């Protein structure tokens, strides 16, 4: 809880300067695992915020999760804490860059505790409806490393009263120094996955959907605001969400289905179902 208080205090201090627009979100998520040899169900909560100061953009987040495990083989339940920070600067209307850092502050079970990730990217906007972002991440998991290349293409348009955003996303992940660690030795050397995302905004309503295809492992997600640091090789992800605006507040509900393999024990057909509630306040 002290991380959230510090995070909100920092946001308030930054908002004391002149801003263009900003927002703060809090969220809670429940997870159900099927066919897993390690996990049964879990809870996650956290907060994120974004602050725009002229050409500068700052995004920060914190999340904490508690997951019930099967004992044996594990000795205790899982407890994780993660921190995220993203900085962006617009050089012009057409060009901007971003810097990312992520930190797994706590994980009492996986050897990826204290993992650190760093990213740098550039965005090109050739037209107000179209943008392209290229971001490169390097993740230090202690006993092994990954290099991740992301390509994201966004297209925005309007059909009558409906605003539409279509996103194409590709992740390429290269594993390094991973074969000597039992936690990661069954991984492939390279991973390639892609996604299509759709967001519709009609009056005060939001509708979103996404589908990921291809395998990914130890992936940095959500533009550097999420990291999947456990040894689960995902090959299917489907998501849907619905939201509504209430003045400056937006309330959203999301559901995500994922299929994975727990690679240390090569346990396939693990399914993960997540339900997430988000409350966002815009300044």
Image (tube, rainbow, N blue to C red):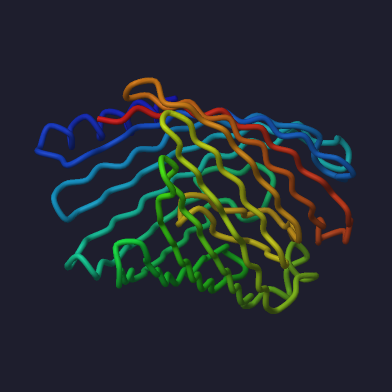
Residue found at x 22% / y 60%: 89
Vertical relation: 233 (above or below) 68: below
Q: Which quadrant is home to the N terminus?
A: top left
Is 214 or 61 nearer to us in this picture? 214
Vertical relation: 231 (above or below) 40: below
Q: Percent from the top left, x then y, of residue 199?
A: 51, 47
Q: Is residue 163 left or right of residue 23?
A: right
Q: Is residue 29 left or right of residue 269?
A: left
Residue found at x 13% / y 50%: 54
Vertical relation: 228 (above or below) 188: above
Is 161 or 281 nearer to us in this picture? 161
Which residue occupies the extreme front position in the image?
A: 160
Q: Is residue 18 left or right of residue 56?
A: left
Query: Residue 33 falls in which quadrant of the image?
Result: top right
Which residue occupies the extreme left position in the image?
A: 18
Q: Percent from the top left, x then y, of residue 141?
A: 57, 62
- Tag count in the figure? 0
Q: Percent from the top left, x then y, of residue 217?
A: 68, 63
Q: Percent from the top left, x then y, of residue 124?
A: 31, 71
Residue found at x 81% / y 56%: 262
Q: Is residue 158 left or right of residue 255?
A: left
Which residue occupies the extreme top position in the image?
A: 246
Is 10 or 170 nearer to us in this picture? 170
Q: Which quadrant is home to the C terminus?
A: top left
Residue found at x 81% / y 60%: 264
Is 229 or 143 nearer to us in this picture? 229
Vertical relation: 57 (above or below) 42: below
């Amino acid at each position: 809880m002290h991380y959230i208080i510090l995070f909100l205090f920092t946001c308030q201090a930054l908002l004391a300067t002149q801003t263009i627009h900003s927002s703060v979100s809090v969220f809670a998520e429940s997870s159900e695992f099927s066919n897993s040899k390690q996990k049964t169900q879990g809870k996650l909560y956290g907060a994120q915020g974004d602050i725009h100061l002229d050409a500068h953009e700052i995004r920060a987040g914190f999340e904490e999760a508690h997951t019930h495990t099967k004992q044996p083989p594990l000795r205790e339940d899982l407890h994780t804490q993660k921190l995220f920070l993203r900085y962006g600067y617009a050089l012009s209307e057409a060009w901007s860059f971003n810097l990312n850092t992520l930190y797994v502050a706590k994980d009492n079970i996986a050897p990826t505790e204290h993992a650190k990730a760093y990213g740098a990217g550039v965005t090109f906007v050739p037209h107000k409806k179209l943008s392209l972002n290229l971001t490169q991440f390097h993740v230090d998991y202690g006993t092994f490393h990954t290099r991740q290349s992301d390509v994201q293409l966004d297209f925005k348009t309007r059909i009558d009263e409906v605003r539409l955003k279509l996103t194409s996303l590709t992740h390429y992940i290269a594993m390094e120094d991973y074969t000597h660690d039992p936690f990661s030795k069954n991984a492939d050397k390279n991973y390639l996955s892609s996604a299509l995302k759709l967001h519709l905004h009609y009056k005060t309503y939001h509708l979103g959907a996404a589908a990921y295809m291809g395998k990914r492992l130890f992936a940095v997600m959500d533009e550097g605001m999420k990291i999947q640091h456990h040894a689960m090789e995902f090959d299917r992800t489907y998501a849907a969400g619905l939201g509504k605006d209430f003045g400056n507040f937006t309330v959203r509900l999301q559901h995500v289905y994922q299929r994975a393999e727990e690679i240390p024990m090569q346990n396939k057909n693990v399914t993960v179902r997540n339900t997430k509630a988000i409350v966002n306040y815009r300044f």
